[in-house]
Image: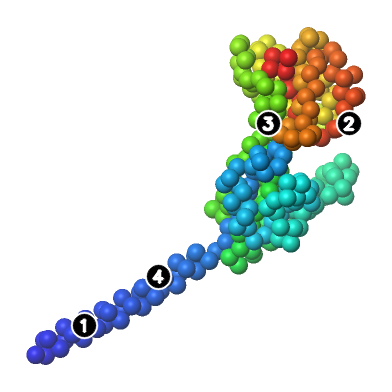
Amino acid sequence: MSKYLGRCKTGRYLTVLSFFLALFFVSTTSAAAEKGRLYVVGMGPSGPDLTAPRALSVIESADIFLCSPGMPKKFALFKKYIDPAKVAFNPWKEVRSDALRKLKETDPKAWEAGIEKGRKKVQDFIRDKINAGKTVVIMDGGDPCVYGPTLYYLLKGFDPDLFEVVPGMGAFNAASAALKQSLTPDGERFILLTAPRSLFGENWEKDDDILKDLSKYKTTMVWYMALRSLDKVVQRFEKYYPKDLPIAIVYYAGYPDKEKVLRSNLGNILEDVKKMDEWWLGLFITGQCAK
Ligand SMILES: C[S@@+](CC[C@H](N)C(=O)[O-])C[C@H]1O[C@@H](n2cnc3c(N)ncnc32)[C@H](O)[C@@H]1O
């Protein structure tokens, strides 16, 4: 009998213990589940018709947006998705203000310190919101991994476990569709995505041997952020390429009403480009696909 009672007591203890263990487990897992998340979302080259469904569903469930003022406006044109009331602030102002830009030339150390301070402000804000269980979304044009400023500037050093990247259609996809060409026509060895600052340096301090080497091969080159320094880019090409090298500039790729393709060649591009009045939103493309 006493043996039986002993077993009952043990059984009761075990039941109580497992109850508390279950309670502990539920409370810790739900605390973890309550944590928020950051999404770096590739918005595609233009409006939501070229934004991936996965990106749109993340946007719909977001609590907070960090983006440039242009992004909600761009999507408002399509009467969709980004609730302006959820936009916290423009994170780029923290790392790319005019004041910081000036410092870059006059006092590079102070410029770096300024960027670091801005980055910390943005990252602290995001971390606080994640801890409060919020879904934060940073929106990048095109694809975040191709010359996207978020991964490059804002999230340097940020814990990768706290965020996900949602891929987007890049400008070069929309631009090649506008050209109605494969970027790898016969004989072309590769497609190279680049920008003046990548190939020639922030202050054009790098030599152009690499371009000389590339000129030995049939290559499609897609240049980002090249329009504002087109004359310098063309000067460098002229050293190694013939005047009939096909060049196209695709402006506003993917925008139903604004997309334009300018087809030209190395000899004429600087003259032809004067007809266009856009120095940012265009891709400079060289190679046979630009014909
Ligand atoms: C900071 S980069 C961003 C690139 C973006 N992450 C992507 O994947 O397309 C900005 C440059 O991308 C190019 N660009 C972006 N969107 C474009 C579009 N819709 N049409 C043409 N060029 C575009 C321009 O060269 C612009 O100067």
Residue type of the residue flagged with mark 2:
Asp
Of the residues tagged 4 and 3, which is closer to the observer?
3
Q: Residues within 10 Å of mark 4 (few under 14, many from 20)?
A: few
Q: At which x and y percent is residue 254? A: 71, 34
Name the residue beneath numbered marker 3: 174
Residue 259: tell me if it is visible. yes
Q: CA distance from mark 2 to mark 3?
A: 20 Å
Distance CA(mark 2)–CA(mark 1) = 84 Å
Residue that label 4 marks: 25
- Circle 3: is it few (<14), some (14-19), or many (20+) Cα within 10 Å? many
Q: Name the N-terminal-most of marks 3 and 1.
A: 1
Badge 1 marks a residue whose secondary structure is: helix
Instruction: Give the amino acid at mark 3.
Output: Ala
Task: Name the mark nearer the viewer: 3 or 1.
Answer: 3
Residue assigned mark 2: 277
Task: Say what amino acid the circle numbered 4 marks.
Answer: Phe
Amino acid on which the number 1 mark rests in the picture: Thr
33 in relation to 173, above or below: below
Judge by depth and name the residue closer to the eye, 146 or 110. Answer: 146
From the image, state whether disc 2 or disc 4 is nearer to you: 2
Q: Which residue is mark 1?
A: 10
Label 3's element? Answer: helix
Residue at 64 percent of width and 61 percent of height: 63
